[in-house]
Image (spheres, helix red, strand yellow):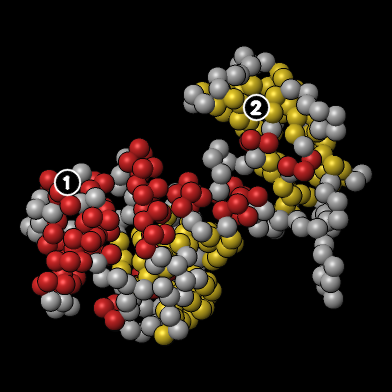
Amino acid sequence: MARLELSGLTRRYARGDTPALAALDLDVADGELLVLVGPSGCGKSTALRIIAGLEPADAGAVRLDGRDITHAPPQDRDVAMVFQGYALYPHLTVRENIEFPLRMRRVPKADRATRVAEAAALLGLGKLLSRHPAELSGGERQRVAMGRAIVRSPKAFLFDEPLSNLDAALRAELRVELASLVRRLGTTSVYVTHDQVEAMTMADRIAVMRAGTLQQVGTPRAIYEAPANVFVASFLGSPPVNLVDLEVTGGRARRPGLDLPLPAGVAVPGRVTAGVRPEHLAIGAGPEGAIRLAATLVAAEPLGAETILTLDADGARLRVRSHGFNAPARGETVPVHLAASALLWFDGETGLALRPARAGDGA
């Protein structure tokens, strides 16, 4: 295992352009699975390629296990990368593909055979070693790509959207297997994806990126429950968080159809954005003390175990999770309730989360 440290990593593709990666600082602990997540073009794959040595950094440093590898060639970095497109040699068998990096390092034949057998057993490829990539399914090809990385016994694994070419059902199956495998191996890993479900279900910690900058780092639960800004709140969660812009007047946050109590202990600006997750809204009057509003059903999306309702509250669109196939009639106006504690609050101008002041702040 090894600690991976990124310090001030910056990458520009053209002089004067906004950097693709802007002063990224990030530490990945020994044996940790850290997921870099964000929309296309946010810089997550650029960061991964710099770690692997496939792209230079214009500024900053990369350290692995205390060693500065910023300018080391890829073959000397002791990292193994698993690509989105498998990158298998079509004329080689599964066995030959897995052992290829060992052959390049002139590992003795007996040792190669042992390490390939161990990796194949770990990945369930034992019966496929004599096949060629064209004879494999997408999931099997990705396992071969994993095997080729595993046999090297690197200090760090780098995964560049390895499941994005697979269908939804296989992707769901393999993300469980992949996360379990990485934890069994105990190898420090950085996993890049734009899929927030992969990020939430696989990561020890998530690093959310946007336009080349790091937005927030934390456990999946911490980021989901206490997002640092509107972007993080809206990016993680399916269905996405409900966000409503409000004006602060008379000690309340208001807009047509909504009148919300402001959070205690928070310095509130004149304009705020309130957020609430769909699972924290419910149809009905609710218990005493609940926040209540009336909304009209616009659409219902039955998914079996739940139905996603889209409601209109005087122009504010709200998504609500409803159990099973329970849904009012389209066009029907129904009561909706939520607890004040479920609300997320953001500055209406900056989008930053509004947090209660702590003792010592500003001292």
Mark yes or no: residue 254 visible: no
* Camera-side residue of 198 and 1: 1
| SS under mark 2 | strand
10 Å crowding of disc 2: few (<14), some (14-19), many (20+): many
Which image quarter holds the C terminus?
A: bottom right
- Type of amino acid under label 2: Leu
Q: Which mark is residue 357?
A: none
- Residue type, numbered disc 1: Leu
Determine whether the residue tagged by mark 1 lies in a helix, strand or loop.
loop
The residue wearing badge 1 is 136
Tell me whether circle 2 and circle 1 mark residues in contact (CB < 8 Å). no
Mark 1 surroundings within 10 Å by alpha-carbon count, few (fewer than 14), some (14 through 19), many (20 or more): some
- Give me the residue at 29% from left, 77% from top: 74
> Which residue is drawn at the image coordinates 7% and 57% (left, top)?
91
Image x and y of residue 230, in percent: 64, 52
* Residue pointed to by mark 2: 311
| 123 in relation to 212, above or below | above
The outermost residue toward the right is 250
- Judged left or right of residue 348, residue 164 is left
| Residue drawn at (55%, 49%) of the image | 235
Tell whether 20 sits left or right of 275: left
Please state if 120 lies on the left or on the right of 288 as rendered: left
> Which sits earlier in the primary sequence, circle 2 or circle 1?
1
- Where, by quadrant of the figure, is residue 4 drawn? bottom left
